[in-house]
Amino acid sequence: MKEDKLKGRKHELMIAVVEDYINDASPITSGGVQKNHLTSVSTATLRNELSALEAMGLLKQLHTSGGRVPTVLGYKYYVNHLLQGLTLNYDQLDGVKSLLDERSKSLSEIVSGVAKIINKAVKYPTVIYVNGYDKLVVENIKIIPLVGDSALALIQTSSGYLTNTLDAKASSEAYEDASKYLTKKFAGKTLGEMMHDMEKLENDMLEEISGFKEILDTLIEGINKFVEENHLNIRQEKAIDVLDDSADDEQTKRMMKLLGDQEELERALETSGEELSVEMVDDDEEYSGLAVIKAPLCIDGTPVASIGVFGPQRMDYKGIASALKVITSQLKGENDET
């Protein structure tokens, strides 16, 4: 029998063991299972069933005379079962829709707000990897003169605006003319297409707009800087307290190291498809004992980021998965509780 095809009592027992261990952090015994779940089954029978699950690699004993805890394979089995029948509560999170209702918000503010809402709800480190800037559709470009020679560039997109400061030393009239020209040229195109095509525009308006090349160069530099500075948003308020309650010292150290490993965070948050998923770290890998629950993040139908909640493998998958599903559904404009 394969671990993904447990039937009847073995399946019920496996789910009970994982949920009890997540709740109590104590190894699970046959007596505990009988008392809390399968009251009509003898402890001897339950011991045999637990031994069978251990032989399948779903459970393990930390000590020969103690109870059992889930393995990585056991957690994966539980999560696969959980995601197939996830119940959503759309009153679970407050403030999601207001982030999108205010069209004046920048994309970085929306992303930061989403991360803050999730982090507050689940109490685990939350990371948003914004890897879809190039897919954003440009609606309007406005370059506003500031004090001195600098200006503020506002790029309105379908999912919020991007902003950066320019230092092109151009006149107010030049900034206004450049705004009108660039909006006419790129409205309706993606930011990726705009960035690609802007590098070819240097000679287009040199005579008509004074300082046009310098405006373009600083705009390209500013957008690249914005993307670089805003592609990862990490929220970890109260993370240490939660991890101290949920994991051993070594696991906590691994978690804090992971949160500082930008390359690994980006790899972990790469998503395939449109569904919520869970990734476990195997026991022999650098970040063993950790897991991430992740989902793609779409704003007004545009996939712009991946959101992930990181924690020990013994964490509240049900609550976290539900919260992520609710927030991703609302950001896509869904609110169907059926």
Image (cartoon, grey):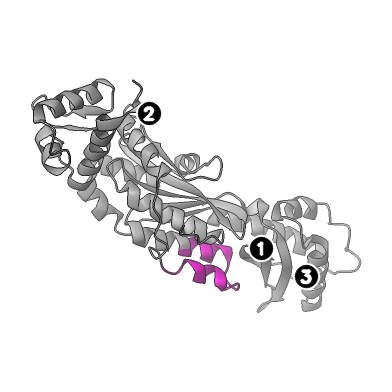
**Which residue is disc 3 drawn over?**
179
Say which quadrant the N terminus sits in: top left
**Which residue is disc 1 drawn over?**
158
Q: Whole-Å distance between the Cαs marked 1 and 2?
A: 42 Å
Q: Position of residue 269 (x, y in %)?
A: 48, 44
Q: In which quarter of the image is residue 194?
A: bottom right
325 on left or right of 331? left
Q: Is residue 108 located in the magenta-colored stretch of the structure?
A: yes
In this rendering, is residue 91 above or below 135? below
Name the residue rendered at 24%, 55% in the picture. Answer: 241
In-front residue for pair 51/206: 51
* Marker disc for residue 325: none
What secondary structure is found at the residue carrying circle 2?
helix
Q: Where is residue 152 in the image (x, y as percent from the top left)?
A: 66, 71
Name the residue rendered at 79%, 52% in the picture. Answer: 197
Q: Is residue 232 located in the magenta-colored stretch of the structure?
A: no
**Which residue is disc 2 drawn over?**
4
What secondary structure is found at the residue carrying circle 1?
loop
Magenta stretch secondary structure, dominant? helix
294 on left or right of 46? right
Foreground label between 2 and 3: 2
Callout 2 amino acid: Asp
The magenta stretch spans which residues?
A: 94-113
Callout 3 amino acid: Ser
Name the residue rendered at 18%, 43% in the picture. Answer: 25
